[in-house]
Image (cartoon, grey):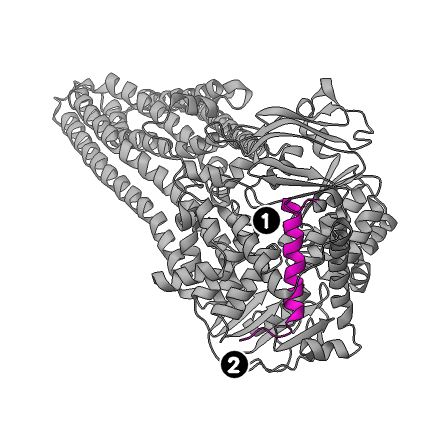
């Protein structure tokens, strides 16, 4: 197998029999996920064969969740069977989550599962795999995003329970899940270095014990802390299992996921997070037209354009009149004055050509400038929108406006509005000529015009709504396509290509339907206008032919006929252009919707800029902090009052929905406080600009973000650091050797979302970014969930060394990452449950923190003490 130059996987010899449980472990970037990808057929094969007999189910490392409700995600195209469904929910520990949601499993999930915590997303996709009832299960690090209690429950009820007769290959960094496997594969540099059972591998001196050792060290640090705080010894395994049951009764939902808590918001809207796309009703407001016409130079170009077109029309009529009037009608007149006649005609023609040139140039310039201004306004508005907007707005909607609607502004809008004005001027010119020559035509022309206007009034409301519908139906196609691309591996693994292709075609049909009816409506109008126009022309021709001789000059009569031919076409084109312009104006209306979004606070407030060295000490004071996501919703954080002392390590723990991530978001002002304040080093953060605040803090997020470009660009986007500093940071975060092996070194490419690097490596890159930035305050949102115990240990050591004189706030699932903290903050339902040093909290038997520690150490004892769980 290969990706790029060197083979990603090499010399893989593996045979897995039916019903075997195979664990795959190894350091970051050793090829664990690639091994699963190769079994799925997702990698280019250089040599060798892969034979898979039986249908597959796959759980990727980065959760892939479809927009829709939770039940749709779990069923994934299979029919609903209540018994099987309920067993699946129970085995995947989702019952308690459903109790939290008002709409239970009908709760709508936002784009990319934005309103679910990391652990909830992971468990939903495990449930999806379990419900498929496949024969082979490929699980890529399914326990990384869940906490100790849920992880053990998943392992026991799911892998060793409901799936006990299935073939399972699971990648894991948690050593306590290894003893139960029939076969353990240890991977390094794309090769399987060792294979065997847990006991066999421990006996061989091959580096496997490094992983186990790192885990034991972590466990030991927890145990030491516990025993030093309490002299009580652990009881026997039986007692531990009783304790297990008690904990479950007292804390039925010990969970520590990092969540973006919009659950309450969903409750208010009966399970709806993503609302239907807003659509204006009725006629397009005058303000939309005014906004478009006055966007460039306050609309000063518009009268000049109309004047140029009017002048062109007048000069055209004059030149035609001149030829009709001045040219001789009989053979007897000599052509003495012919030169003069042609000179006047040429001057009139040049004048009208100049007017057309001026008009066309100004329309093009004004159209482009207007489109550019609208685009930059929309872009600024969207980029400055608060996070809540992106949580509830699928990307497809934004993309649809910046592509489809914007292209209408770029290419069509100016010419459509121009044609509308020009055809009216043209019609007025024709009417003026006809009134001079054969005013009798107006006897029929006026009533026909009235009928045309009535038709236009009848057609416009239908066409306008159809155009709006077509605009809205474009977004789901983009959204579904992008979502399907992201989860292509999962779709293929579950053999669901046909269903997704069908869904895509269905969405394209939904988009084409209003468009087709729009075209039909256009044909309906065109047919009627042309019929009426033909009727007017026939009448005028009849009139001119039947007039007695001498009533009208023959040359002028000829002129009248040529204008009369155009009269009908022009009348139809005026109505047609007005309708067309209104249809296209809907794109302007849609862009204006996104140009006036509510914005975040200003980036810089000149009057209150913090000192250059702020924050120096890094003390964070919360005073009576209350946060809610919208006015009508209850508070997510309630009366939080505490102080994180400067240059200390603070751990934040708590169950799902307790407000951990909300607290972090409040520090970065991603959500604004409704009441109370956050003061960092004597500066109230609500009084300073967002740029001044966020540029001084660092965060390593739970979902590591990398941008398309190079390694250097990702680590040092603002180009403030030298190569040496970047290499130093890479070495500290354990990536130096890997990057040195790449031919382009720091210029090595990073594809979209960093997909060509493993999830663990991406987390390490985010750590490198934080190391380079050297902020006084660092926030870690479960930053080492996807790395093995050995790397995790190394990272924790680096963080404690590099950030020893800085404030570090850690949200953690792995207890040993918070056990070394100076202080631990335990949140429960948005309030502070406990806040003290770990040692003090452990002294109290009934403290929430003690129970979590007991839970963690007990799980490790259970799995390590029983090398093989009973099948």
Q: Position of residue 852 (x, y in %)?
A: 64, 51
> Which label belongs to residue 18?
2
Res 595 visible: yes
Residue sitting at the far right:
724
Identity of the residue drawn at 57% across and 41% down: 658
Work out whether residue 464 or residue 278 is closer to the camera in this orientation and state it.
Answer: 278
Please give left or right for residue 778 compared with residue 441 in the image. Answer: right
Q: Position of residue 339 (x, y in %)?
A: 43, 24
Please give left or right for residue 508 compared with residue 517 in the image. Answer: right
Distance (Cα) linking label 1 and label 2: 34 Å
Q: Position of residue 670 (x, y in %)?
A: 61, 34
Identity of the residue drawn at 19% across and 36% down: 531
Pick the quarter of the image with the N terminus: bottom right
**Main SS of residues in magenta:** helix
Identity of the residue drawn at 55% across and 73% down: 168
- From what the image shows, is residue 573 above or below residue 208? above
Please give left or right for residue 196 compared with residue 94 in the image. Answer: right
**Residue wearing tag 1:** 257
> Which label belongs to residue 463?
none
Q: Dot 1: few (<14), some (14–19), or many (≥20) neighbours within 10 Å?
A: many
Secondary structure at numbered mark 2: loop
- From what the image shows, is residue 779 above or below residue 555? below
Q: Quadrant of residue 831?
A: top right
Region of the chain picked out in magenta, as a range: 844-871
Q: Dot 2: few (<14), some (14–19), or many (≥20) neighbours within 10 Å?
A: some
């Amino acid at each position: 197998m290969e990706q790029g130059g060197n083979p990603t996987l090499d010399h893989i010899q593996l045979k897995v029999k039916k019903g075997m449980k195979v664990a795959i472990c190894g350091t970051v970037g050793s090829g664990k996920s690639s091994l699963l990808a190769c079994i799925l057929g997702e990698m280019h094969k250089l040599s060798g064969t892969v034979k898979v007999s039986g249908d597959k189910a796959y759980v990727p490392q980065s959760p892939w969740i479809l927009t829709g409700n939770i039940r749709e995600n779990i069923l994934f195209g299979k029919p609903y069977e209540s018994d099987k469904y309920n067993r699946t929910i129970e085995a995947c520990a989702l019952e308690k989550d459903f109790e939290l949601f008002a709409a239970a499993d009908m709760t709508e999930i936002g784009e990319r599962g934005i309103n679910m915590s990391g652990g909830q997303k992971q468990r939903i996709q495990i449930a999806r795999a379990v419900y498929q009832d496949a024969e082979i299960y490929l699980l890529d690090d399914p326990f990384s995003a869940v906490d100790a209690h849920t992880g053990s429950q998943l392992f026991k009820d799911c892998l060793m329970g409901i799936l006990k007769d299935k073939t399972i290959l699971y990648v894991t960094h948690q050593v306590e899940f290894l003893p139960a496997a029939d076969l353990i594969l240890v991977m390094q540099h794309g090769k399987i270095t060792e294979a065997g059972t847990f006991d066999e591998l421990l006996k061989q001196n091959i580096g496997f014990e490094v992983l186990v050792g790192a885990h034991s060290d972590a466990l030991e640090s927890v145990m030491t802390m516990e025993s030093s705080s309490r002299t009580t010894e652990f009881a026997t395994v039986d007692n531990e299992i009783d304790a297990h049951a008690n904990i479950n009764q007292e804390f039925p939902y010990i969970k520590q996921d990092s969540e973006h808590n919009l659950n309450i918001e969903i409750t208010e809207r009966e399970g709806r997070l993503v609302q239907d796309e807003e659509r204006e009703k009725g006629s397009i407001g005058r303000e939309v037209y005014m906004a478009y016409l006055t966007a460039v130079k306050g609309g000063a170009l518009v009268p000049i354009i109309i004047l140029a077109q009017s002048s062109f029309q007048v000069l055209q009529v004059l030149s035609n009149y001149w030829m009709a009037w001045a040219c001789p009608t009989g053979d007897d007149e000599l052509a003495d004055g012919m030169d003069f006649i042609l000179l006047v005609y040429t001057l009139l023609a040049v004048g009208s050509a100049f007017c057309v040139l001026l008009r066309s140039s100004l329309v093009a310039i004004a159209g482009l400038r207007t489109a550019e201004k609208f685009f930059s306004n929309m872009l600024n508005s969207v980029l400055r929108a608060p996070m809540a907007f992106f949580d509830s707005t699928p990307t497809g909607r934004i993309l649809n406006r910046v592509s489809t609607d914007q292209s209408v502004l770029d290419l069509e809008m100016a010419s459509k509005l121009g044609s509308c004005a020009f055809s009216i001027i043209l019609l007025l010119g024709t009417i003026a000529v006809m009134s001079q020559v054969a005013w009798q035509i107006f006897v029929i022309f006026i009533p026909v015009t009235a009928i045309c206007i009535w038709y236009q009034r009848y057609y416009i409301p239908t066409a306008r709504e159809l155009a709006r519908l077509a605009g809205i139906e474009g977004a789901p196609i983009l959204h579904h396509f992008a979502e399907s691309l992201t989860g292509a591996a999962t779709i293929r693994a579950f053999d669901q290509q046909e269903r997704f292709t069908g869904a895509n075609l269905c969405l394209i049909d939904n988009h084409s339907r209003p468009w087709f009816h729009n075209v039909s409506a256009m044909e309906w109008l065109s047919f009627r206008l042309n019929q009426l126009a033909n009727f007017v022309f026939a009448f005028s021709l009849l009139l001119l032919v039947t007039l007695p001789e001498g009533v009208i000059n023959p040359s002028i009569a000829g002129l009248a006929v040529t204008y009369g031919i155009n009269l009908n076409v022009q009348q139809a084109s005026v109505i047609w252009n007005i309708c067309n312009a209104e249809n296209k104006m809907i794109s302007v209306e849609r862009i204006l919707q996104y140009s006036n979004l509510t914005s975040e606070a200003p980036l810089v407030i000149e009057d209150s800029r913090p000192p250059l060295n702020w924050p120096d000490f890094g003390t964070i004071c919360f005073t009576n902090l209350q946060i809610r996501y919208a006015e009508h919703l209850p508070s997510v954080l309630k009366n939080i009052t505490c102080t994180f002392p400067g240059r200390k390590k603070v751990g934040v723990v708590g169950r799902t929905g307790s407000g951990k991530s909300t607290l972090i978001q409040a520090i970065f002002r991603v959500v604004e406080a409704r009441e109370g304040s956050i003061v960092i080093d004597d500066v109230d953060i609500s009084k300073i600009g967002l740029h001044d605040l966020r540029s001084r803090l660092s965060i390593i997020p739970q979902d590591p973000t990398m941008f398309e470009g190079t390694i250097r660009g990702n680590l040092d986007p603002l180009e403030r650091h030298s190569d040496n500093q970047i290499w130093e940071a890479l070495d500290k975060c354990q990536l130096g050797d890997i990057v040195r092996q790449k031919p382009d070194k720091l210029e090595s490419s990073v594809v979209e979302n960093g997909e060509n690097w493993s999830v663990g490596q991406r987390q390490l890159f985010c750590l490198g970014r934080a190391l380079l930035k050297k902020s006084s305050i660092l926030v870690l949102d479960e930053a080492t969930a996807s790395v093995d115990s050995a790397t995790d240990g190394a990272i924790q050591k680096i963080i404690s060394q590099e950030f020893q004189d800085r404030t570090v706030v850690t949200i953690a699932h792995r207890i040993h990452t918070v056990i070394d903290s100076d202080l631990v903050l335990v949140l429960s339902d948005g309030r502070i449950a406990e806040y003290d040093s770990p040692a003090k909290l452990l002294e109290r038997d009934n403290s929430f923190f003690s129970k979590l520690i007991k839970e963690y150490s007990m799980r490790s004892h259970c799995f390590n003490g029983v090398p093989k769980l009973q099948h």
